[in-house]
Amino acid sequence: MTATTVQPDTAGQAPRPTFESLDPATGDVVGVHPIHSAEEVQDAVARARAAYAWWGGLGFDDRAEILLTWRSVITRRMHQLADLVHREMGKPHGDALLEISIAIDHIAWAAKHAGKVLGPHKVSPGLLMANQKAFVEHKSLGVVGVIGPWNYPVFTPIGSLAYALAAGNTVVFKPSEYTPGVGTWLVDTLREVVGGKDVLQVVTGLGETGNALCLADIDKLAFTGSTATGKKVMAACAQNLTPVVIEAGGKDSLIVDEDADVSAAADAALWAGMSNAGQTCIGTERVYVHEKVYDQFLTEITARARELDVRAGADAAAKYGPMTMPKQLDVVRSHVEDALAKGGRALLGGADAVGERFVQPTILADVPEDSLAVTEETFGPTLVVNKVRDMDEAIERTNATAYGLAGAVFSGSRGEEIARRVRSGMTSVNSVISFAGVPTLPFGGVGDSGFGRIHGAEGLKEFTYAKAVTVQRFSSPLELVTFARTKVTEGRLAQIITVLHGGKKTLKR
Ligand code: NDP
């Protein structure tokens, strides 16, 4: 939650616009942060460009040492960071620790693997260019802008920050207006490690500050947030032809096959749908269950959901906390009301479950597929559970969305097959969200969920450009790129190409 103010004139300085981050459970002020102007954002980018001369010039090993030290500092202070995450966005301390732990693992992986993934790789020059040595390397871009959301204020931005930094870029980071303290904490800890150098800087503020970062002199923009804002970010970046990575929203499904472990599926669906108050981009929002196990699944998940303790505490007893953004309460309520008006059934919760700050667990069954709760991102602790005839129908319904971020499949025998037919960037079989904790796997979506990848080798390459180099080892018997080329050489070229590619080939059907 945020509120903007103008700080009074002190010590003769001009008043400075600021905003407050508020505890979403109580409304208490957690911190006061500056609203950085477009000029200040541009200044930060200029400082990042100057720092790039040093950081980009370091070898992968030196950068890895610094990033691994940063990783250790975060690890030693992880409870302090988890406390700040809890206060700014409301999730229980244990959930914050889980998020921070996975982020730490990603920093370590990016630091340790950047050299191997991005350094020069020899490739085959092919027969025509057999006299050449050929290699490709991935070079840093320069200054990367990162815009992050509030729902996973550590894990999500680290997926861009760590990979962009490990690749050799410097970064200017604009955290969400709901979690500016967490963003500042991350930046300050790296600043400590690099002795104050501007390798990673933070700019705080509202949407305008993010827009200024898009328009600044950056070499790439990594955005994580809603699809609607992603479109604005792309439009702004288009003005300077700045490339973008868009990690946007989702409407992920969890599919339950007739031979699945139904108890495990119910437990996983409940956690993936309701932990973090359902405010998870890769969380489950829809569940498609085989008709043979549908009733059993509904009984199991409803019984478990009834037990969830929802309140403000940081302790382990509180399973999830308040909604971080007050305006999201209206979205959740409208989706539930629409589902019920169209004929869906509330097995637990319902429109009355949406309070002033908290939403109680809501399980909706038999919800028509044209309902908002099925077509739009709800981002609350609600689950739509619908019955399907077979797995073909489950896949068809899963794929009938403009989004394509992630999902899960529970099946005894066909998990991998079903997972591969789902149109999304990531799927876990017989578990939920596991791919996010595997640093070697790329993270990202298709369609309205965005494009580009963070994490893994793809995530490192995302913040680089490919540089191709050939080195002539000896002169070729076929001198092709010279005005001295002869008819004989051209004839030989035609013969070689005919031998290589002119054989008769018929399509195997
Ligand atoms: P928003 O799209 O509202 O905001 C994301 C970021 O963009 C914030 O820092 C916001 O700043 C900033 N912003 C707002 N307006 C502009 C603008 N015009 N130009 C540039 N930046 C701008 O998303 P939320 O923060 O509400 O995050 C929730 C969304 O993020 C959900 O849709 C969720 O699915 C998605 N998400 C996707 C993930 C993925 O990896 N695919 C991971 C996590 C979340 P401010 O807060 O100051 O307005």
Image (cartoon, grey):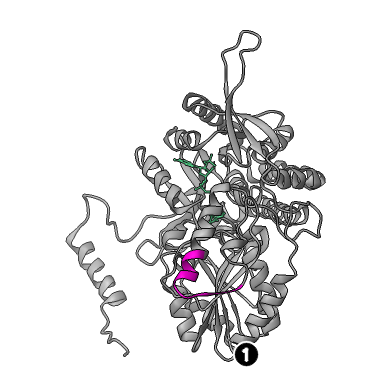
Q: In this view, does 112 lie to the left or right of 227?
A: right
Coordinates of residue 50 in the picture (x, y in percent): 55, 27
Of all residues shown, which one is farthest toward the left? 487
* Residue in the foreground of this view, choosing between 222 and 283: 283
Of all residues shown, which one is farthest toward the top? 12
Q: Is residue 341 magenta?
A: yes
Is ligand 1 less than 8 Å from the beta carbon at label 1? no
Q: Residue at x 37, y 61 (%)?
A: 129
The N terminus, quarter of image: top right
* Corner quadrant of residue 291: bottom right
Q: Mark 1 points at which residue?
A: 259
Secondary element type, mark 1:
loop
Q: Can residue 120 be seen in this view?
A: no
Few, some or many C-alpha atoms within 10 Å of disc 1 (few <14, some 14-19, many ≥20)? Answer: some
Coordinates of residue 5 in the picture (x, y in percent): 58, 26
Coordinates of residue 279 in the picture (x, y in percent): 60, 57
Q: In this view, does 66 lie above or below 392?
A: above
Q: Does the magenta stretch include residue 493?
A: no
* Corner quadrant of residue 204: top right
Q: Is residue 199 above or below residue 109?
A: above
Q: Which residue is drawn at 81% across and 54% down?
A: 315
Q: Is residue 52 visible?
A: yes
* Residue in the foreground of this view, choosing between 349 and 123: 349
* Corner quadrant of residue 92: bottom right
Residues shaded magenta? 337-347
Coordinates of residue 356 in the picture (x, y in percent): 62, 50
Q: In this view, does 225 lie to the left or right of 10?
A: left
Q: Is residue 302 above or below residue 50?
A: below
